[in-house]
Image: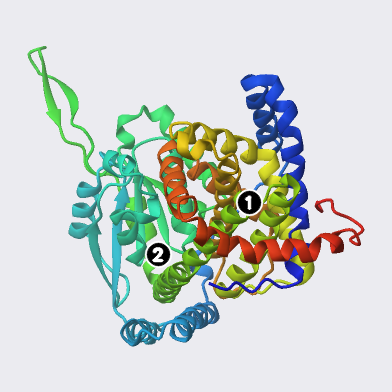
C-alpha cells in the first residue's frame, strides 16, 4: 500500500520529534535511578499538568423565557447543516428523510392548546402526591389545558451503577420533552439536585422548584431552608420559581380538654399547603405559555442537531480508525527497522504529523502548515509531561518479556511503543473533533486538545488493553517481515531524503 508522504511531514513533525527525543535522552539516566526514580519523574510531569492554572469553565443557563423565534430558526439552520453534511458524506436517504421530516415539524405553533407538565425529583420527594393534588385542583386561567405526568426518579442507584450521565437517563429525556417541569426537593438542596436543576435550565427547560414536606421541619427552620434554596439558585432561576409546599402533611396529634377535666388525644390530618405552587403555575401558564412552545421547539431542534452530529461522528470515526491503524503500523515497522534511535523518533514524528493531516481532512478541519507544527508540538509536550513515552515503554517491555522470541528483538519494544504513541495521537484527535460543534468554524484549541490527550491516555493504559494491543501489533509486523519491510521502505526513504534538510531548520524546539 503506497503512502504519499509530502515535504511538510518532516518539518511539521519536528516539534513532536524533539519532545520524544528529549524523553528518550533522559531515559538512560532514569533507568539508573531505578523504578522509584521513574515513577517520581512521571508523577512530577503529571503534577505540572494537574496544577497548571486554568480559568474555570462556565456555562450560562439559557432561560426558557429568553428563547426567541430567531434562536429557534438558528437552531433549525444548524440542525439542517449537520443533516446536509451527513447527506454529502454518506447519502443515507432513509435517515436523512427522517431527520428532515422531524425538522420540518418544528415551529412556534401558537395554536397549540395543550401544555405538558412533568413532576421530577429524586426518590421520596412526594412526586405522586403532588401530581394527584395538581390534577384535582388545577383551574386554568386561560384557554390552555395542562396535562400532568410523573417521571421516573432521578439519581437512582441503577443509573449510578451503569455509569449513566444525567442526560442519558430516561427521566432526563422525559423532563426535557415537557413544556414545564416542577422539580421537587425534600429539604436543603443536594449537589445532585442543584446540578440537575442547572442542567435543565441550561437546556432551556422552564423549571419551578418546590420544596415539598416543609411540615417536617420546625416552623423557625422553614424560612431559612427556603431562603438557602433561593440564594443557591439565584443565578439559575427566578426567585419566584422557588416555593415551599406541603401537599400531604403528616398527621398531627391534637389534645382536646373535656368538660369533666380529662383530655383526649386524636390524630388529625392537616390541609395541604400548596397555594404558592398553584399560584405560580397559573401565572406562568397565563403569561408564558407561548414561550413554552417556542422553547420546546428550540430544545427539539437542538436535540435533532445533536442526533445528526452523533450520526456524522460515527460515519467519520468509521473512516478515521483505518487511517489510525495504517499509520500506527507504519510507525511500528519504521521504528523496528531503523537502527538509529534519533531517526526512530524522527520517523514517529513525521508519521504522526501526516496522520494529523489526514484526520483533519476527514473531520473537515484542514490545517495550515504552521498549525500542523503547533499541534504536533502541543502533543509532544503533553506526552512528555504525562510520562507516556517512559511508562508505555516499560509496560510494553514487561509484556514482551513473557515471549522470548519477540523480546530478543530489541527493536520490538520501540516499534510497539511508536505504534502506541501514534494511536494515542489519532484517538485524541478523533475525540477532540467529535466534541466540537458541527456548525462551528473554529480553529484548534491546543489546551483543550492537550486535555483530551490526557483523557485518552488514561483510557488506553489499562493492562488488558495494552496486552491485546501488543499481541495484535506483534502479530502484524514481527512474523511478517516482508510486509514490514514494504511499510518501512516508505518512511526510510523519507528519512534519507530529509536528514540533510533538518540542518537548515533554525528552531527545533516545540513551541509553547
Nearest to N terminus: mark 2 or mark 1:
2
x and y, in percent, of residue 35 in the image: 62, 22
Residue, far front:
482
Query: Taking 504 as reference, is 286 left or right?
Result: left
Can residue 322 be seen?
yes
SS category of the residue bearing label 1 = helix
What is the spatial separation of the Cα atoms under label 2 and label 1, in whole angstroms?
A: 71 Å
x and y, in percent, of residue 101 in the image: 34, 86
Can residue 432 be seen?
no
Q: Judge by depth and name the residue closer to the eye, 431 or 478.
A: 478
Residue, far left:
260
Q: Is residue 345 above or below residue 410?
A: below
Q: Which mark is residue 283?
A: 2
Q: Is residue 27 above or below residue 148?
A: above
Residue 269 in which image quadrant: top left
Q: Is residue 91 above or below residue 62?
A: below
How many neighbours does mark 2 have within 10 angstroms: few (below 14), some (14-19), or many (20 or more)? few
x and y, in percent, of residue 54 in the image: 71, 45
Q: Residue at x 47, y 50 (%)?
A: 473
Q: Judge by depth and name the residue closer to the eye, 227 or 360.
A: 360
SS category of the residue bearing label 2 = helix
How many neighbours does mark 1 have within 10 angstroms: few (below 14), some (14-19), or many (20 or more)? many
Q: Which mark is residue 335?
A: 1
Query: Taking 53 as reference, is 293 left or right?
Result: left
In this view, the mark in front (2 or 1): 1
Q: Residue at x 47, y 71 (%)?
A: 319
Coloring applied to the structure: rainbow
Q: Residue at x 42, y 62 (%)?
A: 206
Amino acid at each position: 500500500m503506497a503512502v504519499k508522504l509530502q515535504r511538510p511531514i518532516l518539518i511539521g513533525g519536528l516539534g513532536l520529534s524533539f519532545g520524544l527525543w528529549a524523553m528518550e535522552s533522559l531515559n538512560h539516566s532514569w533507568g539508573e535511578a531505578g523504578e522509584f526514580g521513574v515513577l517520581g519523574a512521571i508523577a512530577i510531569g503529571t503534577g505540572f499538568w494537574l496544577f497548571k492554572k486554568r480559568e474555570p469553565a462556565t456555562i450560562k443557563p439559557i432561560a426558557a423565557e429568553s428563547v426567541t423565534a430567531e434562536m429557534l430558526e438558528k437552531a433549525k439552520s444548524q440542525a439542517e447543516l449537520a443533516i446536509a453534511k451527513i447527506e454529502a458524506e454518506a447519502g443515507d436517504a432513509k435517515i436523512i428523510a427522517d431527520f428532515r421530516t422531524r425538522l420540518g415539524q418544528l415551529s412556534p405553533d401558537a395554536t397549540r392548546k395543550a401544555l405538558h407538565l412533568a413532576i421530577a425529583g429524586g426518590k421520596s420527594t412526594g412526586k405522586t402526591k403532588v401530581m394527584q393534588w395538581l390534577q384535582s385542583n388545577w383551574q386554568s386561567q386561560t384557554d390552555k389545558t395542562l396535562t400532568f405526568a410523573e417521571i421516573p426518579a432521578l439519581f437512582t442507584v441503577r443509573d449510578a451503577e451503569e455509569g449513566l450521565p444525567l442526560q442519558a437517563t430516561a427521566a432526563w429525556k422525559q423532563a426535557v420533552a415537557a413544556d414545564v417541569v416542577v422539580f421537587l426537593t425534600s429539604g436543603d438542596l443536594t449537589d445532585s439536585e442543584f446540578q440537575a436543576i442547572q442542567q435543565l435550565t441550561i437546556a432551556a427547560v422552564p423549571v419551578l422548584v418546590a420544596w415539598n414536606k416543609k411540615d417536617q421541619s420546625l416552623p423557625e427552620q422553614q424560612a431559612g431552608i427556603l431562603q438557602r434554596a433561593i440564594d443557591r439558585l439565584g443565578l439559575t432561576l427566578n426567585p419566584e420559581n422557588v416555593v415551599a409546599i406541603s401537599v400531604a402533611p403528616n398527621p398531627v396529634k391534637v389534645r382536646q380538654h373535656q368538660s369533666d377535666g380529662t383530655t383526649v388525644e386524636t390524630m388529625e390530618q392537616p390541609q395541604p399547603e400548596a397555594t404558592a405552587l398553584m399560584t405560580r403555575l397559573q401565572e406562568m401558564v397565563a403569561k408564558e405559555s407561548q414561550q413554552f412552545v417556542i422553547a420546546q421547539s428550540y430544545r427539539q431542534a437542538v436535540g435533532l442537531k445533536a442526533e445528526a452530529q452523533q450520526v456524522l461522528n460515527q460515519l467519520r470515526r468509521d473512516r478515521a480508525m483505518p487511517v489510525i491503524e495504517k499509520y500506527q503500523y507504519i510507525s511500528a515497522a519504521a521504528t523496528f527497522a531503523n537502527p538509529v534511535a534519533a531517526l526512530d523518533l524522527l520517523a514517529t514524528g513525521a508519521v504522526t504529523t501526516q496522520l494529523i493531516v489526514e484526520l483533519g481532512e476527514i473531520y473537515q478541519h484542514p490545517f495550515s502548515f504552521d498549525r500542523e507544527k503547533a499541534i504536533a508540538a502541543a502533543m509532544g509536550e503533553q506526552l512528555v509531561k504525562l510520562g507516556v513515552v517512559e511508562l508505555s515503554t516499560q509496560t510494553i517491555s514487561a509484556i514482551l518479556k513473557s515471549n522470548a522470541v519477540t523480546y530478543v528483538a530489541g527493536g520490538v519494544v520501540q516499534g510497539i511503543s511508536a505504534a502506541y504513541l501514534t494511536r494515542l495521537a489519532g484517538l485524541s484527535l478523533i475525540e477532540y473533533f467529535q466534541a466540537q460543534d458541527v456548525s462551528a468554524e473554529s480553529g484548534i484549541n491546543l489546551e483543550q486538545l492537550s486535555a483530551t490527550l490526557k483523557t485518552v491516555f488514561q483510557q488506553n493504559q489499562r493492562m488488558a488493553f495494552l496486552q491485546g494491543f501488543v499481541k495484535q501489533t506483534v502479530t502484524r509486523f514481527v512474523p511478517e517481515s516482508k510486509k514490514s519491510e514494504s511499510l518501512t521502505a516508505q518512511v526510510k526513504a523519507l528519512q534519507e531524503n530529509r536528514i540533510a534538510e533538518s540542518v537548515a531548520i533554525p528552531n527545533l524546539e516545540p513551541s509553547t
